[in-house]
Amino acid sequence: MRATTATAILLGLTGITVWSWRGVASHPGGSPPADELLAAERTSPNTLIVDFRDDITDQELAARGYLDEPISHFSATDRMYRIRFRTPQDAEDAARRLRADPMVESVDYDAPVSLFPEDWTPAAPPVDAPECASENHSGEAGAGFPNDPCFRYQWHLRQVGLPAAWKLGQGRGVVVAVIDTGVTRVPDLQETRFVPGFNFVADNDKTDDDHGHGTHVAGTIAQSTNNRRGVAGIAFRAAIMPLKVLSSRGAGSMAAIAQAIRFAADHDANVINLSLGGPFPVTPVRRAIEYAHRKGVVVVAAAGNDGRGRVSYPARYPDVIAVAATQWDETTTFYSNWGEEIDLAAPGGNMRVDQNGDGKPDGVLQNTILPGGAQNGYLWFMGTSMAAPHVAGIAALVVGAGVTRPDAVRAVLVDTARRPKPASSASSRRIDDHYGAGIADARAALQKARGSRGVASLGLGTALGLLGLGGIRRRERLAGARAWAFAGALVLGASGLFFLPSLGTPAWLADSPISTGALESLAFLLGPAGQGNPLLWSALFPLGAVALLYSVCSLRPALAGLAFGVAGGLLFSACAYPADIRFVPDVLDRAWLAANAFLTAGTGALVLRK
């Protein structure tokens, strides 16, 4: 009877898990209209971007008779080159021949890319907030958490659910690639962790910003926080990977962006932010985004600032989370592009107004450099370029909570987006082409990623444990200290004390291993090597624990509980599919997780019977 009840509970929990973590399809995309392709050809009619097959040899390349100009030294491996011609007709003739070449994967006219209009540029001096540069020794301006003195001006962080979300997660262990003008380690980024990046403009590893845009974007994602200085960032425990693709004038090439995306995917980035774009599609960028998506990287991009119903590239591609911009009153801004490709809205600001009456422009405030890089300040910017890093930062929080598969991250962000005040009466999940699903909500996203996951994993682990207990003889059933050891280990194996961060406990518990299940804790400790590691996301850990400690009779109840708890976590992942298992084909991820879940549960049952 008890086994029958546990089976019913298990099936019910599995069904609820699948429903509550249902996937969200990528936004519409596909081949661009023919008129856009023709327009793209007119942008750089004398220059082609040619992506040859990776296995083409130098001799075969030279035999084609073109003067191939590397995009960077990575062209030696990815075989992407720029070829310039004397006239547009010469380029057109070469493009026709190259498209018929079996050693060529794609041919595109070189499409320039730049920062969007309305984003701050050196020609438009920003407004500075000099009081942010002084440390908050008194605690008056930034009392509580965070204690950054100018957090009070960051209305945009409160609009996306902070600081409440920081009790649930802070992005520790996550790497966010900022593909932009570079990132300079200004004073309020001193405590932020950086990982090596690359400069695709100068073809070297010097990734400092010489414009200001990229550093501002990085600040929204991971500005050093609660350091009694300046302002705050969303995922302040995450690491920044600076990838410079735009010059001091904010201009660059889509080919460099394609290489930067691949670099990020190949160097353990979890999230990519693209606060840039253009009106035209470029095949290598689309293919690079698809490559990053297959490798488990979440890609976020700005919708564009033309104020029209056409989302810019690369935000327009299907595997990208496209972000529109809101202002203080939660309406979308005058400059924000819209369209069916919009997934979410987030604060981009409007420096032309002061709707909140704080005496400051309603822009997005971060610490960044002034043109040339010699000085820095606390500056307000506005644009969808500022909206995108809000979503990238929240995505980093979600990844840090154990949801790593890009489609699962998108599902969490879309399902938990909140309705803005002007659209509170909307009834469908998607509001419209201006907001997408609504305004990104960090607190709600983390509650789903961490809380709902913890409840479901613990429930599944408990159901499996009841099945295991139902199969042993009455005289062997657990009681007293053995029962407590079994239950405690099951909780730690399945979910950890996931409820602690929501009970007002210290903020450091948000990313503590004790607030997640055993496998998530190990992944946390291993860093990038643990995320989606097939050896970790398997039965290996509980089997190893049993093999090492089984001879200690007093530990067997705890070993069994741990096995059932880990099995619950694995079964949750098989049902909800939040994690991408590396080196395992995507179509086999669920089978891998489910098979290891039942192998782990079987191990627990065997330990109980002996």
Image (tube, rainbow, N blue to C red):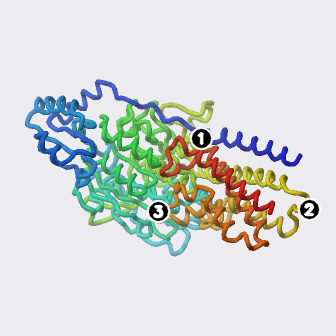
Spatial separation of the CA atoms under disc 1 and disc 2? 48 Å
Q: Is residue 514 left or right of residue 339?
A: right
Name the residue type under label 2: Arg
Q: Which residue is mark 2?
A: 475
Residue 231 is tagged as 3
Residue visible at 26% across and 51% down? 77
Residue 83 is tagged as none
Depth check, front residue: 603 or 334: 603
Q: Which residue is mark 1?
A: 415
Q: Earlier in the sequence, mark 1 or mark 3?
A: 3
Name the residue type under label 3: Val
Q: Are marks 3 and 2 in contact (CB under 8 Å)?
A: no
Name the residue furthest left. 86
Name the residue type under label 1: Asp
Depth check, front residue: 362 or 540: 540
Q: Quadrant of the C terminus?
A: bottom right
Of labels 1 and 3, the one closer to you: 1
Is residue 229 visible in this depiction of the protein?
yes
Task: Find numbered disc 2 in the image and state the secondary structure of the residue it sits on.
Answer: helix
